[in-house]
Amino acid sequence: MIKSCTRCIYDENVSGISFDVERICCYCRQIETLSKDFKTATPDGEREFERIVDKIKRDGRNKKYDVVIGVSGGTDSSYMLHLAKEKRLRPLAVHYDNTWNTAIATQNIKKVITKLNIDLYTYVIDCHEQNQILLAFMKAGICGADAATDLALAEIMYRAANKHGIKYVFEGHSFQAEGVSPIGNSYTDGQFIKSVVKNHSKIRLSSYPNMTFFRFLRWIIFARIKKIRPLWYLKYNKDSAQKLLEKEYGWEYYGGHHLENRIASFDHSFLMPNKFNVDQRNNSLSAAVRSGFISRKKAIEEYAKEPVLEEGLLEYVKKRLQLSDQDFEDIMNGPIRTFKDYKTYKKRFERLRLLFYFLAKANLVPMSFYYKYCFPIKEQK
């Protein structure tokens, strides 16, 4: 029998997992700690967020914008725009276009920013370079072929904030709705991106907005740009947020978490489950169980269903990346590697754990960064 958590649906195959005497997993306990620290979904949490909003308004006086919000056309980032305007903030929306957006995502962004009268800054990577980065990760056998996108979005949000003198960035992450992804399936840093590309492609990164270690320190220590995750303080239900967005803005649902982007959809719905035996739906389903949105039984039943792959998406990916059927089979049957096989900043983050703890307490890095990146990973037994 596979050992599993009695509270969520994580089992012993999840990277870095451990269980206590009550057979509750370390990730559930981590969420408990975060909920307590941020007073999530309580009146105290709401008051703390209001205090942050007031500080943002004061610091943004005489500026055109007072907060940067990264947008993808998905639920959480779209709701962030709604929330910011509801709180009478003046956001600048920032979008990183990895050239794989769905039409729905593009229209969702346009609908929301148009009705709310929000300015949008979009950074578009060179299409060929983006495809070569994706191919490098696929050939490397790294779980999480689109790891470069999340880091690039973080970098351009910092750049936009710094350019306009903005000291705050809102991120739409919610551990109530998404949980906290195990690091083995979601690691990324600037050195890691550079190392994978160098080892598995012939290109040099040029248009890709990489975040080196020292650029990271520049943004968080010298520029003092704070990252705020409002949904860590507030009560949040993704289904309710989607209904609000549909009613207020004509926003459309795209089928599932991360499926608003076609390469992310391919990665989550096909590549991860079939090559790595990793199904990222357990993150959101476990989060929904912890938050009481669905029963554990219902989550297990849902998780037992096959991931849904958009019709024609596999052939589209092959064609766009110029992969023959044999090339693709070679990738699927190739070796599996992890970030440990490449140069990374991981050990550096661990050595500077105390520094990042204080930076996390000051909202200069997310607390999830501290938990995920600053501790050695427990080896699976």
Image (cartoon, rainbow, N blue to C red):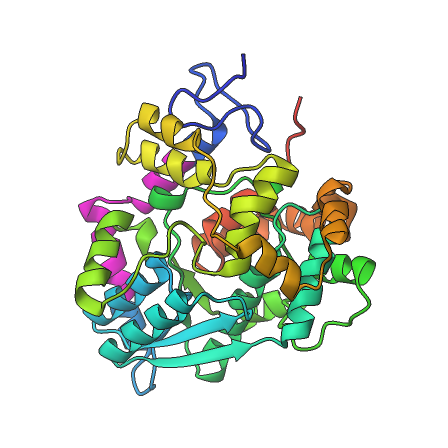
Q: Quadrant of the N terminus?
A: top right
Residue 167: x percent and y percent?
A: 42, 73
Residue 268: x percent and y percent?
A: 53, 47
Total numbered labels: 0
> In the picture shown, does residue 248 fall above or below 296?
below
Q: Main secondary structure of the magenta part?
A: helix
Residue 7: x percent and y percent?
A: 37, 24
Residue 61: x percent and y percent?
A: 29, 83
Res. 98 in view: yes
Q: Is residue 172 found left or right of 279 in the rendered image?
A: left
Res. 213 in view: no
Q: Is residue 38 found left or right of 138 in the rendered image?
A: left
Q: Is residue 324 found left or right of 9 in the rendered image?
A: right
x 33%, y 46%: residue: 38
Q: Quadrant of the C terminus?
A: top right
Q: Nearer the viewer, residue 145 or 54?
A: 145
x 58%, y 53%: residue: 314
> In the picture shown, does residue 241 fall above or below 222?
above
Q: Is residue 187 magenta?
A: no
Q: Nearer the viewer, residue 14 or 219?
A: 14
> In the picture shown, does residue 137 fall above or below 63?
above
> In the picture shown, does residue 342 fall above or below 26?
below
x 40%, y 34%: residue: 286
Q: Nearer the viewer, residue 166 or 330?
A: 330
Magenta region: which residues? Answer: 31-53
Q: Is residue 45 magenta?
A: yes
